[in-house]
Image (cartoon, grey):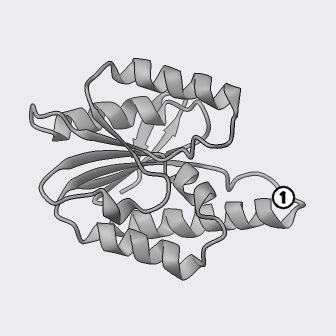
Amino acid sequence: MKILYYGGQKSGKSSLAEKKTLKLSNQTKPFYIATYNNSYGDNEMQKRIGRHQDQRKGSFITIEEPFNLPNVIQPEETYLIDCISMWLLNNIEKKEEALLAQLESISKINSHMVFVLNNVNEGVIPMDKESRRFVDMTGVVGQKLASFCDEVYEVKLGIERRLK
């Protein structure tokens, strides 16, 4: 089973994705793939990471992988990948084809995967080139994920709405 949770910042998507992942894991401890590249020295992000870690309370085995998801996903396991937006940011200099190839590769692995993706596509077109690329690639990556996920949920105000 592959599932996508898609929503804005602080929409509740990570909490809902964690609950779904634990349900899919059938009493075994699932893996949490943390995609944030911790080399930026951003204190505010460190606080966010701490809150996410507290929220998980040891329910997951954490794997930190900011760049190459196929390297850490094995068959017959359960994974929460939080979040694809950070993975995309870390890999923004790579070609679109390379990023989509990574996603295609993991789509073929026989494992439960729950993906979290930020909705950044409903605002104005950004003025700078890098931000436009990130927003555009988030849309492209989101479409790719939705194409192979069995279920897709939009999350707003902590409420999930099934789209697929």
Residue most extreme to the bottom: 97
Where in the figure is residue 66, as x and y percent of width and height? 49, 52
Nearer to us in this view, 46 or 100: 46
Viewport quadrant of the N terminus: bottom left
Work out whether 94 lies above or below 5.
below
| x 27%, y 31%: residue | 60
Where in the figure is residue 85, as x and y percent of width and height? 56, 52
Amino acid on which disc 1 is placed: Pro
| x 9%, y 31%: residue | 27
| x 46%, y 31%: residue | 159
Question: Label 1 crowding class (10 Å Cα cut-off): few <14, some 14-19, many 20+?
Answer: few
Q: Is residue 76 left or right of residue 33?
A: left
Nearer to us in this view, 103 or 118: 103
Work out whether 17 lies above or below 104.
above
Quadrant of the image occupied by residue 21: top left
Residue most extreme to the right: 127
Question: What is the total number of numbered labels drawn onto the structure image?
Answer: 1
Viewport quadrant of the C terminus: bottom left
Nearer to us in this view, 120 or 25: 25
| x 16%, y 63%: residue | 110
Judging from the image, what secondary structure is the residue with disc 1 in? loop
Q: Is residue 65 left or right of residue 18?
A: right
Work out whether 128 lies above or below 30.
below
Quadrant of the image occupied by residue 14: top left
Where in the figure is residue 23, as x and y percent of width and height? 19, 34
Where in the figure is residue 17, as x and y percent of width and height? 36, 37
Work out whether 45 lies above or below 109.
above
Pointer 1 residue: 126
